[in-house]
Amino acid sequence: MTATILVIEDEPQMRRALSAGLRANGFAVELAASGEEGLDRLALVRPDVVLLDLTLPGIDGLEVVTRVREWSLVPIIVLSARESERDKVIALDRGADDYLTKPFGMPELLARIRVALRHVAQTDGAEPVFVDGDLRVDFAHRIVTLGNAEVHLTPTEYELLRQLVVNAGKVMTHHMLLERVWGPASVDDTQYLRTYVNQLRRKLSLDPSQPSRIVTEPGIGYRYRRSTV
């Protein structure tokens, strides 16, 4: 079935460009020019993915994310012209799944949408095993293998990896990871998180000359990037 994308964007030229590009790539498109209209369209249409501008008249994008997350898990990709990393972090912490900084290319946006749709499909299927190339994470037995060898992880390392792979393709902020792995009292210990990410990278034996599966989002957090399509 054709996936439906809801675009909440107040700039007419950007709305037209996004609508044309998405429709040309086989998506159905719904448009909204304000936060209020976007919430109404979301409730009526129930889209598969939401593209959300942060700067909107009336209810801004951050408030839209908050209200949507009160009742829906639809993937939200923030489209932001704001240079402040703080706004992006707030949007992600409130429940947005990803963000793109304007200007961006249609191929990158399409790739992010495909990741969001794939993540929803995987969540619905409740897969007990995550496989990405030579990496395999067996959630039921808490076993991680790389090639034919088992990777021995501490409980904390395993939980950190689990959070990243379950949300593969999504930006996980420092705050999210610290709260989910170590608890609310540790949300400011970013250096601690960085140390564990480096340990994971070493144990997964990723070639340092190649891009890592665990990608750093500077100033924001980390993203697990699949090595296979």
Image (tube, grey):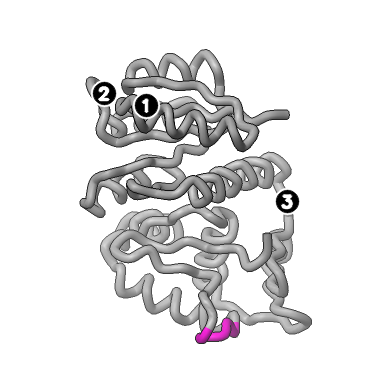
Q: Position of residue 167 (x, y in %)?
A: 55, 53
Q: Which residues are magenta?
A: 205-209
Q: CA distance from mark 2 to mark 3?
A: 37 Å
Q: Secondary structure at mark 2?
A: loop
Location of the N terminus by quadrant is top right
> Which of pointers 1 and 2 indicates the residue nearer the eye?
2
Marks 1/2 in contact by CB < 8 Å: the verdict is yes
Q: Earlier in the sequence, mark 1 or mark 2?
A: 2
For the point 53% across and 34% down, the residue is 49
User: Badge 3 is on which residue?
Assistant: 127
Magenta region, main secondary structure: loop
Q: Secondary structure at mark 3?
A: loop
User: Badge 2 is on which residue?
Assistant: 59
Q: Earlier in the sequence, mark 2 or mark 3?
A: 2
Taking depth in this image into account, of 201 and 61 the one nearest to the observer is 61
In the drawing, what numbered circle is on residue 67?
A: 1
